[in-house]
Image (spheres, helix red, strand yellow):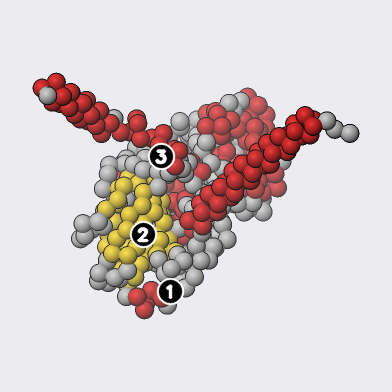
């Protein structure tokens, strides 16, 4: 009986040790798994403008199949593209962003929302903005000499107003 | 006439073939299904036509090709450019850009964009069509090493006096600090001398008239060969007074730091 308990303890200790090792070294263990499932390979930061979902004609708010809304943005030294995005209020919005050079971070001023733009990785997050308003998007991760002047804007408008803005196209506030 | 053993072999062969074929089919079906599910995840209701601003991308191969440029060969090739851009890389007409000390990457990129029609110019497009990527790299190497110091022998248009000296403070503010409220980064954070971005030319010795034209073209979208809409989003935010002030300030030779990489 004693031996059995000791054995259980031994196995439990080993398991815990293994779990601790896995959790701290997850990036070494995990990466091949993501490669296997096809999730790890992001867009090449130097060829974003040539192919893939981040070509300049595909940036901005795009309506998906079931009325879902996806906003694609690029963060780069030292502007966000598109610099100003329009989204409707009260609707979950999926942001898909990546970086063309170094790590940037979008933070929506006045909210708790934010997400990092990492070169070679697509960061995806879903936010809902309950009320119409204007939010500045300062870069929240030091990215270089022009970091402090790197700022985008998010205009949250009512749903009706959004629907009237060039339906079926990528929507940004820069469009005429 | 087949013996029983032979026919048994044949049967086994057929069964094996059938099994292999079945496996192959199953594999094919899975790949098709997987790729189908992949593409359906990407697709949207309406796909706008893809617009590519420039065929140039700053990949390792491109950077290597440009860095192999031979300045001596560039010197020979530059005889065609001297008429407009000056013997020493400073043009005598302020509407043409100065090429002395221009950054290799930006020079090469503009040549490729003229060649592919991504940047339009009735003068430069036919000239660039005759330049191979290697020749453009040679020219880029030559112009990058030309000195930007002034030469009294040279008939350059470069330092033009500012028409409105009051614009200087506006220009300095934009060059050094930018305007965070509108999301305009400081000019010097990409065009030097504080820091550089691939493909951004140094502006300290550029002609003011040329700069003003290009800012205007960028802001209206008539020039759209900047990668990832970088310069277009900045120029769109500038007022016409700011564009004039900036170009006159740089064109008067006040730009911070004469740079060559």
Q: Nearer the viewer, mark 2 or mark 3?
A: 3
* Lateral position of residue B18 relative to residue B147, left or right: right
**Foreground residue among B138 and A118:** A118
| Residue A171 position (above or below residue B161) | below
Asked which secondary structure carries label 3, the reply is helix
Please name the residue that numbered disc 2 is placed on: A94
Q: Position of residue A117 (x, y in %)?
A: 35, 46
**Foreground residue among A171 and B205:** A171
Nearer the N terminus, badge 2 or badge 1? 2
Whole-Å distance between the Cαs marked 1 and 3? 38 Å
Q: Chain of mark 3?
A: A
Give the class, few, some or many, for how many residues have Cα within 10 Å of label 2's Cα (few <14, many ≥20).
some
Q: In the rendered image, is residue A73 in sight?
A: yes
Q: Chain of mark 1?
A: A
Q: Mark 2 vs mark 3: tell me if same chain.
A: yes
Numbered circle sitting on residue A34: 3
Which residue occupies 41% across, 76% down? A163
Asked which secondary structure carries label 1, the reply is loop
Q: Position of residue A118 (x, y in %)?
A: 36, 43
């Amino acid at each position: 009986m004693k031996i059995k308990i000791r054995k259980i303890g031994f196995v439990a200790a080993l398991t815990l040790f293994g779990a601790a090792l896995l959790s701290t070294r997850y990036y070494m263990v995990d990466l091949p798994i993501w490669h296997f499932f096809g999730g790890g390979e992001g867009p090449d930061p130097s060829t974003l403008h040539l192919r893939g979902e981040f070509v300049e004609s595909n940036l901005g708010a795009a309506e998906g199949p079931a009325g879902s809304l996806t906003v694609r943005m690029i963060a780069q030294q030292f502007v966000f593209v598109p610099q100003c995005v329009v989204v409707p209020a009260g609707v979950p919005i999926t942001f898909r962003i990546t970086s063309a050079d170094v790590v940037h971070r979008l933070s929506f001023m006045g909210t708790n929302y934010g997400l990092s733009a990492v070169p070679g990785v697509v960061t995806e997050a879903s936010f809902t903005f309950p009320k119409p308003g204007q939010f500045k998007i300062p870069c929240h991760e030091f990215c270089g000499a022009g970091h402090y002047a790197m700022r985008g804007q998010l205009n949250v408008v009512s749903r009706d107003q959004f629907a009237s803005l060039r339906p079926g196209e990528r929507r940004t506030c820069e469009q005429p | 006439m087949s013996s029983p053993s032979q026919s048994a072999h044949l049967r086994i062969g057929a069964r094996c073939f059938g099994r292999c074929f079945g496996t192959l089919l199953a594999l094919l079906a899975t790949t098709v299904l997987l790729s189908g599910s992949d593409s359906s995840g990407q697709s949207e209701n309406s796909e706008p036509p893809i617009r590519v601003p420039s065929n140039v991308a700053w990949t390792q191969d491109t950077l290597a090709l440009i860095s192999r440029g031979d300045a001596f060969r560039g010197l020979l090739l530059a005889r065609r450019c001297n008429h407009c851009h000056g013997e020493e890389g400073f043009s005598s007409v302020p509407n043409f850009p100065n090429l002395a000390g221009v950054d290799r990457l930006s020079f090469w990129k503009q040549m490729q964009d003229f060649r592919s029609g991504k940047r339009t110019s009735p003068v430069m497009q036919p000239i660039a069509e005759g330049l191979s990527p290697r020749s453009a790299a040679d020219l880029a190497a030559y112009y990058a090493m030309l000195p930007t110091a002034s030469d009294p022998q040279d008939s350059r248009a470069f330092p033009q006096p500012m028409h409105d000296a009051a614009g200087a403070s506006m220009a300095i503010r934009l060059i050094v600090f930018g305007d965070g409220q509108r999301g305009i980064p400081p000019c010097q954070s990409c065009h030097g001398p504080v820091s550089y971005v691939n493909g951004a030319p140094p502006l300290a010795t550029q002609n003011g008239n040329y700069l003003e034209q290009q800012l205007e073209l960028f802001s209206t979208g008539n020039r759209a060969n900047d990668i990832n809409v970088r310069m277009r989003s900045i120029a769109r935010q500038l007022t016409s007074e700011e564009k004039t002030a900036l170009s006159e300030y740089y064109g008067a030779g006040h730009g911070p730091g004469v740079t060559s990489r």
